Amino acid sequence: MSTKRMATYYWMTIPAVLLFFLFLTLPAIQGIFYSFTNWNGFGKEYDFVGFRNYVSLFTDNVVGEAYWFTIKYAVVVTIFINIFSLLIAVGLNSRIKFRNFFRGVYFLPNILSVLIVGYIFNYLFSNVFTVWGQSLGINALSTNILGNESLAWIGIVIVAVWQGIALNTILYLAGLQTIPGDLYEASSLDGAGKWREFWSITFPLIAPFFTINMVLAMKNALMVFDQIVALTNGGPGRATQSISFLIYTGGFEGGEFAYQSANSVIYFIVIAVISILQIRFLQRREMDM
Amino acid sequence: METHKRTNWTVNILIALGTIVVLFPLYMAITIALKDPQQMSQSLFGLPTTWRFDNFASAIELTNFFQAFRNSALVTTATVILTLLTNSMVAYAIGRNMDRKFFKGLYFYFVSAMFIPFPIIMLPIVKLTSSLHMTNLVGLTILHTVYALAFNVFVYVGYIRSIPAVLEEAATVDGATTWGTFWRIIFPLMAPINATVGILVCLSTYNDFLLPLIIVSDQNMYTLPLVQYIFQGQFNTDYNLAFASYLLAMLPMIIIYLFAQKWIISGVTRGSVK
């Protein structure tokens, strides 16, 4: 290839590389750098403190609670999103009328702002679900669960599942549509029940979609931020502070710039490890099936 | 098979019932936006007896809706166009030279950023954008476009490598430059994947809250989600006003969805399954 041709290829990428370095790699390096200092984010001076921030993180209850909340929340959200969206996708893929209309409705939440959906549900939790709880005589529902320290996280789970089902349903549906119909005909002849048919034919064939959906749902849930802002602001108390919410409030409002930088480095490692483990584990399962 | 041809009514009814769960919050949002407090206390769930379009007028005035809409529309449109033009070009150069160390390295450099959670760069990026005077709509557009590279390089390179190189070789023989070949031959061939990327970028930019929250400080530059956040205090318990404002903010995307539903669904599916 001529050097002129090669030169063009280089020029096509170099501006992007520089911008990517400036706005992504450099801030990441700065974040790691500040995590070894005691900078508050606005003052002129700071000192190097070595690993002190990291050591403090592991003994800090506020941080521990944020990790516990985020991971518990992410696991529950991932499980429920995948159960419901798989059920809905199987339903949409069977012989039904108005399938395209229903598909359109189930996907609708995916195009809406997470923050605004959160605000709408905030109202429903305080003014609508409580009315139902009172008239049905269900104690747990008759007061706003977002104001209850031990139940508020469930409220956030409900909102995230309501919205997250949309994307995963469409992906499962795409997976189901790749399965040729005659596979089922063969199995019906064998007299296989629907339940067995699902586990022995359908599920193994959509295994790659299961992997994608688990990883996507988990990663989104671990980053939860908008829902927290709209629903609880981290409360009551600190009951629903997610990790990204804590980094935001501590870093910008609490003068903990360096400390929360260290927190975000740990957070990055946690997300990377979870994603890699998930992908490995699920892909091994794919091969076993 | 008989059972496979007839409509499965049990499933059909269950699927129809399920849509109630999806539509109920939206039904509440629409009806509340059209009622006044008195109607709300009479019937929480009923349709409005008289339609109070005044709520929308007040919401537009209070939140300066048209300005926020203009900001959101500008950032979204500019990001989509800039992303399609630049990200596809970068991916083309990478995809056609994957046998060279430099470009292969670039591929992994961009793609590995998909694993970086935004909070790790959130604190330093605020310092950086303010020192570069980028705390505005132009800054938002540039950041969205740059951050989109990680995922888009991944999606685009996969697609470009499925386009046979023979086409470009023929153009080269005819004396076309690399630059000309890309824009005249390859870019038009990328229409399906451009649609996918365009839709994903449009949705994520329009609905993004965190990036505008941390970098935009000038009130005249607020985007629609940011405005809802800023006005929470003023909406207070005036739910009719608040919901009118929420609906207005969601409406542009809902309208686009009504017209381009099929496109959007297939675009998003293709993008995620890649």
Image (cartoon, coloured by chain):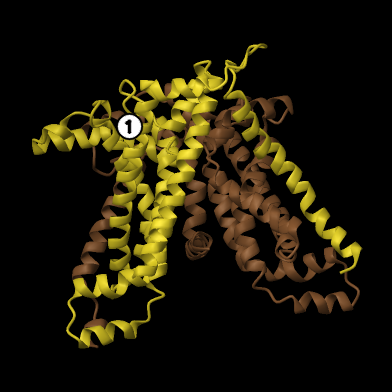
Chain colours: A yellow, B brown
**Residue at the image position 34 percent from the left and 82 percent from the top:** A181
Residue B260, position as x, y percentages in the image: 51, 61
Q: Which part of the image, by quadrant, shows the N terminus of chain A?
A: bottom right
Residue A228, position as x, y percentages in the image: 39, 32
Nearest the eye: A139 or B242 = A139
Q: How many marks?
A: 1
Q: Chain of mark 1?
A: B
Residue B89, position as x, y percentages in the image: 74, 58
Q: Which part of the image, by quadrant, shows the C terminus of chain A?
A: bottom left
* Side (left or right) of A132 relative to B245: left
Dot 1: within a 10 Å radius of its alpha carbon, few (fewer than 14), some, or many (20 or more) residues? many
Residue B180, position as x, y percentages in the image: 84, 66
Tell me, yes or no, if residue A233 can be seen here: no
For residue A280, what is the image quadrant? bottom left
Tell me, yes or no, if residue A217 can be seen here: yes
Report the residue marked by disc 1: B36
**Residue at the image position 65 percent from the left and 63 percent from the top:** B157
In the image, residue A256 above or below residue B85: above
* Side (left or right) of B211 relative to B236: right
For label 1, the SS is: loop
**Residue at the image position 54 percent from the left and 26 percent from the top:** A261
Nearest the eye: B269 or A11 = A11
**Residue at the image position 45 percent from the left and 20 percent from the top:** A56
Q: Amino acid at mark 1?
A: Asp
